[in-house]
């Protein structure tokens, strides 16, 4: 069971400030509140992987998934983010919402020291990784690899439906049991000058990767 109703959770998440100047090289798009709330509600109501759990949010950005995890009862949440500007917004959101038990670590999560320092330190890992476009080819898989090294129980992540077979094969090789929880239409609003359309829908899979012990 979730301690908040889905509609109430989404209302809270709509109050989170996003990126002021998103960086294309980092593929910075804020997870839409509707998608974030549906993801997190499902994680808790169906799998009980948030309440009372220690949670990591990889590539946390302004804190959408981290704050949502707290609202659904995580005992402690740590966001990991490479962009100092995003970390500042994350901190401001946490302060504005008067939320304890959430930290933001400024770091490159793909660096080896992070994997060793936080190896199996979290019950649950949540993330909306870069989809691996532009100059970030393969970054979505790197995020997944880190998530597996940090998580004790499960990793939850979004990946483009077009990569489904590859993600399933990779996740199996990483000694996890992959499961598609839901298929989503991810609406990306125009955030960069090169965008010609106001928004575009992308087919996305919402995955749960159960760690095999």
Image (spheres, rainbow, N blue to C red):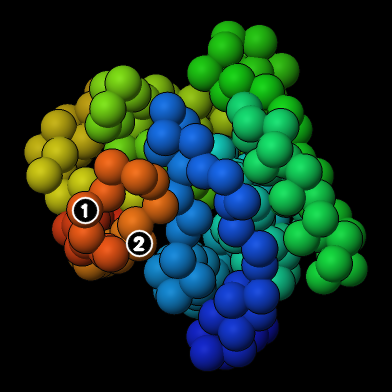
On the image, which quarter does residue 188 sit in? bottom left
Q: Position of residue 36 (x, y in %)?
A: 48, 66
Residue 155 is situated, as x and y percent measured from the top left of the image, at: 46, 44
Numbered mark located on residue 132 in the image: none
Q: Secondary structure at mark 1?
A: loop
Residue 81, compared with residue 181, is above or below; it is: above
Which residue shows up at 38% across the image and 46% down it?
192
Q: Local crowd at mark 1 within 10 Å, few (<14), some, or many (≥20)?
A: few
Residue at horizontal 21%, vertical 47%?
160
Q: Which mark is residue 189?
A: 2
**Is the residue 48 above or below the residue 3 in the image?**
above
Q: CA distance from mark 2 to mark 1?
A: 11 Å
Residue 196 shown left or right of residue 114 in the figure: left
Q: In what quadrant of the picture does the C terminus appear?
A: top left
Residue 196 bears which disc, if any? 1
What kind of element bears circle 2? strand
């Amino acid at each position: 069971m979730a301690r908040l109703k889905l509609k109430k959770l989404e209302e809270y998440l709509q109050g989170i400030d996003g990126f002021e100047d998103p960086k294309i090289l980092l593929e910075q798009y804020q997870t839409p509140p509707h998608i974030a709330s549906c993801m997190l509600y499902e994680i808790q109501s169906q799998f009980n992987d948030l309440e009372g759990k220690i949670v990591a949010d990889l590539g946390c950005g302004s804190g959408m998934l981290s704050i949502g995890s707290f609202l659904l009862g995580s005992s402690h949440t740590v966001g990991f983010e490479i962009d100092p500007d995003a970390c500042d917004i994350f901190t401001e959101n946490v302060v504005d919402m008067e939320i304890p038990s959430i930290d933001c670590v400024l770091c490159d999560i793909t660096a080896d020291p992070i994997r060793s320092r936080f190896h199996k330190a979290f019950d649950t890992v949540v993330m909306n990784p870069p989809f691996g476009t532009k100059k970030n080819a393969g970054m979505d898989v790197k995020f997944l690899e880190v998530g597996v090294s940090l998580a004790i129980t499960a990793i939850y992540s979004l990946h483009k439906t077009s990569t489904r077979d590859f993600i399933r094969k990779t996740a199996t090789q990483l000694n996890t049991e992959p499961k598609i929880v839901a298929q989503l239409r991810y609406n990306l609003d125009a955030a960069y000058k090169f965008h010609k359309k106001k928004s575009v829908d992308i087919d996305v899979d919402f995955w749960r990767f159960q760690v095999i012990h």
